[in-house]
Every structure is written in structure tokens, then in C-alpha cells.
Amino acid sequence: MTCAEAGDDALNHRASRYRCLHLAEALQQAGHIAAVAPLAAFLTAPNPDFEVYVFHRPSVAHSKLKTVLAALHQLGAVTIADLDRYIFPESGEENGSAYGNELQALKLFRKVTVATHALADALRNHQSGTDLMVLPDSLPASLLGLHEVRRPHLKERPRQSLAYVQAPGGHGLALRQIWDVVYKVLSEHEEATLTLFGTADVPEILTNHPNASVQPVLRTPYRMTTYSRFDCILDPALPGPQSKCVSRANYMEATLAGSRLISSPLPDLPPLRQPNLKVAPSPTEWYEHLTNVLEKPVHSDDMLTCVNRTIEVRASRRFVADFLKFLAGG
Amino acid sequence: MRILLYIEPYPLRNEMDHLRDVAIGFANMLIAGGEDPDFQEHDIRLFSNHDVLNRVQESSFASKRFLLWPEREEMDLFRSGLTDWTTGGIAGWRDLLRGEGDVTSAYFSVLDALRERFPFDLIVHWGENGAVRLFAEAHGIGRVVITPGCLRKPLMDSFIIDAGGSGAGGLLASTPIKAVIEAAEDKAWPPSADQFALAGPEPIELAETLYGTVNFSGCEHILNRGDGRAAYVPLHPHDDPDFLAHSGFSTPAEFLREIVVPLAQKRLVVAVRPERACWETEGGDAAMAEARAAITGLPERVLWLDPRTEPVSALQLLNLTDGVITANGHFAFQAMLFERPVSIIGDAYYKPEGVFFKPEDIVRGRVHRKAYPEAIRALRTFILRAGLVSREDVFSFPVFMQRVLSAAGNMERHSVTPAQVLRELIETFGPDEPEALLKEQLPPPPPISEEPVPRTDEQPATVGDETATAKPKRRSLIGNLFGRVRRQRSGAPGGPSSGPYAGAVALDPSPDEVGAPRRFPLSEQEIETIDLAREVLRTQTRRKRKLAVILHCYYRDTTVYLLDQLSRISGSYDLICTIPDFSAGIMESEILHRKPAAIVVPLPNRGEHIWPFSFILNELGPDKYDTILKLHTKKHYAASEEHGTILGHAWLEYALACLLGTHESKLHVGEILKHRPDWSLAGPSGLLARPSCDPAEAESMLREAGLRAPEEWTTFAGGMFWADPQIFAPLIPDLSEPERYAPPRMHFPHEFSCIAETLLTAAGTTGECAIAGLLPDIAEPEINPPPIPGSIEDVLLSYATWSDTFQ
């Protein structure tokens, strides 16, 4: 059983889907029984009949967490914490950390799955003696099945169409760092358009650019459909450990949608050069890549290669065997 | 060609006119079909018992020319079947379905006599019928059967039109699987694409159901089965015609005793979950008690999961077990949508030889046959693209004729291969570009603004807010399949030209008139949705109830909450839930899960809660109910920076406390309304405010409807109230026109729904009427109260504080 975050629409969160539902589907297809419950609901009426329990983003803010874990341990169940974001404080800030409750909860688990290698390193630095597995964000058969029929990567889209997509409740501080570069590129390319899905912290001057338009923040957990309307997605990130631990989910969705992605450097991005991915560590590179993207279309064969490679590398079924081995170990 | 439409005259479930709606549907189809050029080529008559035909004639006198009436002695025969349903009625019907016994001989004779009176060349009959089958075989005439299909609501109300019926004689069941695979060729989709196309919601919503919380009684026996196996056994109603005709069993208990109990004794854990409908037909309680008794000896091996009390869905059981074992229920087809192992004991429309598993295979875990996924993908492909027919299409003359003639022709073709027949059907009735159809269903991206949206201090509204932006339109794959078949439509839907309000004064201003309201034409899809909604209302609002609760369900979570709160209403009522069409699948199942008797009406997402309400009133007319209660799920009303959404909840609580009282007091304002002719509209007193729209436009519309403008314009903010529907009669023809309401979009300043909402309240103050302001838990209302002096926020804050302090 995997437990999602608490909240009525918990399973609708992007993270819950990547971390819980995708895993449940892959396990089920491999012949196991898997169920997913919102954490609050599970803690209220825990089902003791599973052998393994994965708690996604557990938190001691749930007063019953410790009791339930103790009971599960007594029954001999394997319990795992799942972490997909950087929650560690700067030195000496532990008590004041925004994620203090999650940090405390982590100490209740001996086994932890994390979404990226960078996150694994961060956890090792913070908490020794943990049995760790990197369980990457992956693509389940249901999503790939739909992709096979819909083929969004083949969809026609306007050339020189750029998009910036903000997460619900997120901020645009990263875009703020490169807004002038984006503004300049837009001004230099009359045909280029920029669509901003969400404008929190985005400078007004950029949103008011004649080639820019503003749309509501997307609440859909998967962004492929939206991405497939754009040639290139901008995915800037703030410097710092938080961003370093982010997974490549955005890249996977952009690729399946047949879009290019310009991103700040993220360790989880594919290590080898990908025709649809440009990594921009500084404003200078952002300018170069943006200009390049607007002036040179990607070859459709190259795009298809990226799509196939992403599916091959990140299909959920690939990670089931390692996950089961992780459960059995120690 | 002379075609006989034979609507079963045998009394079903102790009713002589059980199939009246079907007959009326066909009569209307024939009347409308007069405009079709092909119509003149055929002579089509409708035959059934007197009671059914009387209902048809009452419904439309124009149907008279199509009706074939039974003779007196034939009626005597039909009426002789009117015995106790559970002891004699079912048995007679079962014999008739199977073509056995004296009853079959007697009905055979009726058909003989009928053919003397009307020498038909083809007989089209509704539901399986062994007498008709034997008659057609004996006389060498064609027959076509229309039966319910293997997809049911909320996924799809589907039907099969097949010359061989819904059992082993059907086209698909009698075709070798190799031919089905050959016909499907490269057209087959992975299961998630088929699920997506059918279920409407994003596949992940389906996943939430599949992988949902496991906490039902006895789940430990399934979860801790170790190396053993578990099977899910769905039960369908004891008088389901497919079960009676083709399963080989007479009762669900017999099926359990003969098949399931022996399997459980071989260490199979079995989860038996009857459908909810099992208790809804006469004799259902006794049949289910008997079925349950059949398995009581094995409490740890066979779980009885009553869907009314156990929190487990059928889809969830698919995931928790190793396979499905069924007599021949339609759920087996749904299991195929998820590529789960299925064992079907009896015959079924979707069961060709050699595809499915034997129960022993599931017991022994031999369910990983490589050819199985390929075979069921091919079956699914044929069934979804060409095999199933939507209810709308069954009663559409061109589609009906094309389907019937095609089905009749299939049996006569001997020169082509079975694969060619199936492929031709897919090509004729399937969509030209199924992938494009699927793309249409995907949540479309928000519209790109022509110009940058003016920036505000706040974030733009997020996608998903009711008032914010266009919502995705989702359509059933099957609903789309027949775009290639001609359809005729007469008149614009939604206008005052239709519905019981048709005679009322129309308020349509001339388009040239200065300031005439803007109109927003309906899309083809919206027209279809409205047509379907009419059909739902026509067929499901036949009970005589005095009170209707009309609930517009937009938000899922608030819908669930509101449905639970309805228990505060004492007495019986019709619950009519309008839902936006894009959420049809998931919302409908959510509602029916909690309120199985609810009438769920998907409608285009226009006019927020106002247009759906006006549409329902227009369709039902002012006399259908004495009293109505209008509710909806709007939330976050009066959200503020300071108080957040707490006021949204307080607003809902306050409105419900005023309208419904508490669970204890069960204040029934509807009853009070009936005995107080001096007032006819009652809403929450503290929400009576000045309207936010310009009353000038509302005033001109009111005048044109012949109503006096109120001295002071007010509106019940939030639009929830009790009312006597008569007061709205002059306004409804106008307010129910969907074209007046803009489709949802991000910015549209002159929303007609605001004017309409103001008009609905104003209607309560015209003529002799007055409005009443209700206070929480207080039965005595204020008559014609003034609008509140301060803000609604103040009212809600003080209520929230009062509520926290005193309750």
C-alpha cells in the first residue's frame, strides 16, 4: 500500500501521482496488490493486511503517524518513507525549518525511497544509517498507452511558440531572474509568442509584452496536452539545493508532448545530449538557447528519438524489480 | 419492406406497460422519421399489448397510424401472465426468453395471427424472445433483436442491434476469434485509451477508484491469501433478461451453489458483490437473501460484499483479485477494459468460443495466456467501434434503419468471410478517425487570449474555477461513433418552442434592437447533450411526487456534502441533479452511489447553476411539482483575504440551516410554503441582498413578461431557495434559452446568469406573491424582508461565530 499526502484531493496532486499511483500501477501489473490512500484517511482507519507500506511525504503533523507505524512494525510490515523534495534546513535551522515535521517523520523510517540522486545525497548528509533507494519519477503503462494513441508529439504547433508553466501555488522568482533575456528575445523575434500559465512574481513588463499572453495556472496533474501546443517550454529554476533535487518530470512531459525544453541545470536531467533539451546555467546561455530555439526547428526524427528514449528509460515497469529487491534487502 | 416493431407484450415485473417508454420512443421516432426520404420505402408498425399502446397514443396521437392493436383473446393471453412476479411471472418470462414451454407456443400463435393482419417481412423485437426466434426460423423471415448492451450507466447506456440476439447466436459470439482479430487489425487501442474514451474522466481518476483505500469487511482474506487465488464474482439482478435467457441458471443462488461454492472449496477466495440494482426490482430482496444463504457455510472463503454498506467498488475488486467469474454479466466486458482474466459460465454477446478462461484456470493461476490480451483487445475494438449503439441512436430513425437493415443483411451474407462482415461494420459505423475523436476528449488547453489579460494584484483564476475559464468537453467515444450517419434535427433546442412552457410569452428581443442581449450559438455537441438531457427527463420523471430538489452539482466534494445534507428533508421527493457534461461519468457515479434514485442530467456548462435550473423547469413545466428546492454547489463565496474560505463554508452552512433546518428539526419549508399562499419564494434571510447586475435590463425583461417590477430589487445571493414553480412560468421560456448564456470563459463581463438570477427572485414579488426570508432553524419566516443593510460577509461572520459558540 502506498499512502499519498493528506488532503481531500491528495491523489490529484502531481507528486502523489508520480510517487504513489504510478508505482501502484506498476506493482499491480507485475502481479502484486497495491492500493493508495490519502495519508489522513489511512491513519484514521489503517488497514493492517498489507506487507509493505510506503508513506509519501510523511509528517509528524499527523498525530497518529507514530502510533500507526509502531503497530505496523509490530505486525512485521515493511514501512518506507518516500521523499521527492528537498526538506533539509540550512545548518542550525532545524527547529525553524518549514519542513520540520517531515524531517522528524523521516527519522521514524529505516528505509527511504527518494526521487533523485541529488536528494539521496542530501539525505545521506543529513541522516546517516538510512537504507536508501533512488526510485525515479516514471511513466506508467496507462499514460504510455494513451500516449501511443494520442501521439501528441506529432501534433502541429506554431513555430516560435514559447510557454512558461507555473505550478499551482508556486512562484515565478526563477523567471524573474531571466525576464530581461526573455523580453529581449521576444522583442527581437516578431513572430515569437510567449504564453505564461501563472504570473505570480513575474514582472509586469514581461506579461505586458505585446507577444506575451497570460493564462491561468494549470491544475491538471499532467501537462502534456498543454505542452503539445508549444514549440518550447521554459523551465528556469532558482539556484540552491531545492532546485537541484527536482526530478525530470517536466522534461519527460515536454518530450512526450513533442516540445523542446530549456531548463536550468538539474542533476536529474538526462546526462547525455538530447536534441530537445537545452541546459542554461546563466542568462547568457538562456539568451543563446532561446535564440537558437526560435531560429532552428528541431528535426522530427530527432524528436521521435527523444520520445522513444524517454519511454524506454523511464517506463515504470523498469523500476519494479529494483524496488522489490530494495524491499527484500536488509 | 414491411417491418414489425414487436415490443414485448408479456407483463414484466407485474406491469402490463413496463415497456411503455420504449414504445413511446419508437413511436416518436416513426413520427419524426416521416421527414426522412427513406421512410416511404418501408411500412413499419408497432405491436404490443393494449396498455403499452394506450400509453403511446396518449403520448402522441400522431402515432396512431403506426399502431397494431392485439385482438381481445390475445390480450387475454397477455394478461394471463399477470401473476405474482417472483413465483410465476419470472418463470413464464424465462420460458418465453428461451423459447420453451406452453407460453412460447401461445405467443407463437399470436405471431401467426399477427402476420395474417400485417404480412411483415422483418420483425424487430425489443428484448430476447424465444417465440419470435422460433417463429422467424419457421417462416424464413428476418428478425433483429435490440437488447441492452454490455456497457451500462454511468459509462454508457448501450444497446445491441443484432440478428442473433445477445447470446451465443449473436454475430460476435458466433464469429471465430481469429476473424475478430483480423477485422480489428491495427485499430485496437491499449486499455488505457479505451478506458479514457469511455470513462470521460482522466484515466487517473479511474486509477483513484482502482487503487483506492482498501477497508471493507473481510478484505484480510483477500490480502492474506498467500499463494492462493481470489476471484471477484459480480451478481446481476435475479430477473435480468440476459441472465435468464443465456446463463443456464434460474437464480443467482443456483449459480453460486453450482459454480462458486465448489470453487471456494478448492481454496479459491471469492468476493461476491451483487449490483445495487439487485435489490431494486420486485423479489430482489428475497433473491439476494437466497443467494447469500447459498454461501453462508464458507464465511472465510466467500465474502458477501453488499455495495450499499461495504466501501468497495467493482473496479477495486478487479485489482485485488486474480480474475472475474460471472454467469454472463455485463461487468465481464468492463473487466476486459482493464485486461483482467475473465471466466464466463453462460453465453454472452461478447463471448466467442475459446477466448475466455475456465474457472479452474483462475483457481490454478493459469491466467497468463499470451493470446488473451490480443483477443480481448480485438473484441473491445469491435464492440466499442461498431457493436454497441447509444440510446439516442436506437431511437433515431436513420441510424435505426441503417443498423437494422445492416444486422438483417449480415445473416443473409454467405459469400463473404466473418472478418469481412465485422470490418465492414466497423467501417460503416465506426468513426473515420478514432484517434482524432480521442484527442477531442482530452482536456483542451485554455484558450489563448488574443490580447494579454490585464494584470491584477491576484493570480488569474485557476483552471477549474466555475466562473473562470472554459472547461474541457468530454464525450463518450460511443456517443461520437455515429457522426457518419445522417441525423435530422428539427428546431433549435432549448428555446421556448419546446417543453411544457412552449405556450408562454416569448421575450425574444429583435436582434436589431439596441441593447439586445448577446447570443452564443450552441455547438453540435451541446445540442446533442441537451437532446440527451430531454430524453433523461422524459423517461425518468414519471413518478408523482410533490417536491423536487433541483441540485446543480459542479464541485465534487461539495456535491457529496450536499447529498448527505438532504437527509434533513422529511418526506419523499424527486432529486434532480444537473451536472456539467464534462464531468458526466465520474459525477454521475458519485451521485448515484449516494442517491441511487437521483435523476442525473448532464448539461452543457453554461449559465452556472441558473440555466440548468431554468432548463429543468422548462422541460418539466410549472405543474409537475408543487414545490421545488433549488440548491447548488458553489463554494468559496465571500472568500476574503482576512477570513479565507471559512466564510465559504459558513455561507453553505448558513444557507442550509435556513433552508433545511437541522437534522433534528427537519424543517420542511416546502410544506409551509404550500399552506401559505401569501408567499411563494423563500430563501436565507441574511443572503437577501441588492443585485450586483444592472436591474434595468432585468426590469425590461420582467415588463415584457407581463410582470410588475419590484419596488426594491433584491436577490438571494447564492441562488438557493424554496419556491412554487408557478411563479417562474412567465420567465422560464426566456431564461431557459441556452444561447443567452455565454460559454464559460475567462472574461465575460455581462453574464446573463446574473440578470437571470435577479429575475428569479423578482418573480417571487410580483402579483399576489411575496418572498419570505428564512432564519437558521426558525420556522416562522419574515415576509418581504428588506435587503440586509451591511455586507453578506458580516452576516456569515456573525453566524460562524454564533455557530461555533453555541453548537
Image: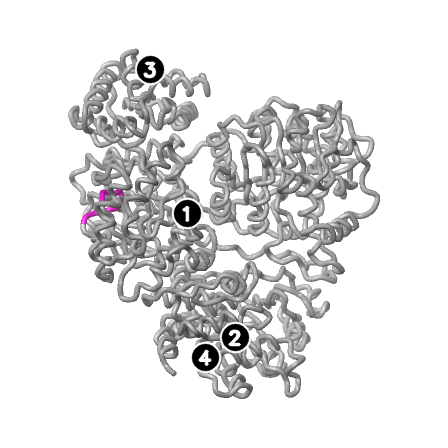
Give yes or no for residue B352 being in the magenta stretch: yes
Task: Measuring from the top left, give residue B159's x and y in whole percent.
Answer: 35, 38
Q: Point out the frontmost of discs 3 and 2.
A: 2
- Tell which subunit mark 4 falls on: A
- Tell which subunit mark 1 falls on: B
Query: According to the image, label 4 marks what residue?
Result: A111
Total marks placed:
4
Q: Nearer the viewer, residue B251 or B486?
A: B251
For marks 4 and 1, give the CA distance.
37 Å
Give yes or no for residue B691 being in the magenta stretch: no
Q: Which mark is residue B307?
A: 1
Query: According to the image, label 2 marks what residue?
Result: A84
Give the secondary structure at mark 1.
Answer: loop
- Tell which subunit mark 3 falls on: B
For marks 3 and 2, give the CA distance.
72 Å
- Mark 1, Cα crowd under 10 Å, few <14 / some 14-19 / many 20+, is some
Query: According to the image, label 3 marks what residue?
Result: B69
Q: Classify B655 as above or below B317.
A: above
Q: Point out the frontmost of discs 1 and 3.
A: 1
Q: Which amino acid does the dot numbered 3 rest on?
A: Trp
- Do callouts 1 and 2 point to residues on the same chain? no
The magenta segment = B346-353
Task: Measuring from the top left, give residue B351's x and y in whole percent.
Answer: 24, 46
Q: Which amino acid does the dot numbered 2 rest on?
A: Asp
Q: Classify B455 as above or below A179.
A: above
Q: Point out the frontmost of discs 4 and 2.
A: 4
Dominant secondary structure of the residues highlighted in magenta in the image: loop
Give the secondary structure at mark 4.
Answer: strand
Give the secondary structure at mark 2.
Answer: loop
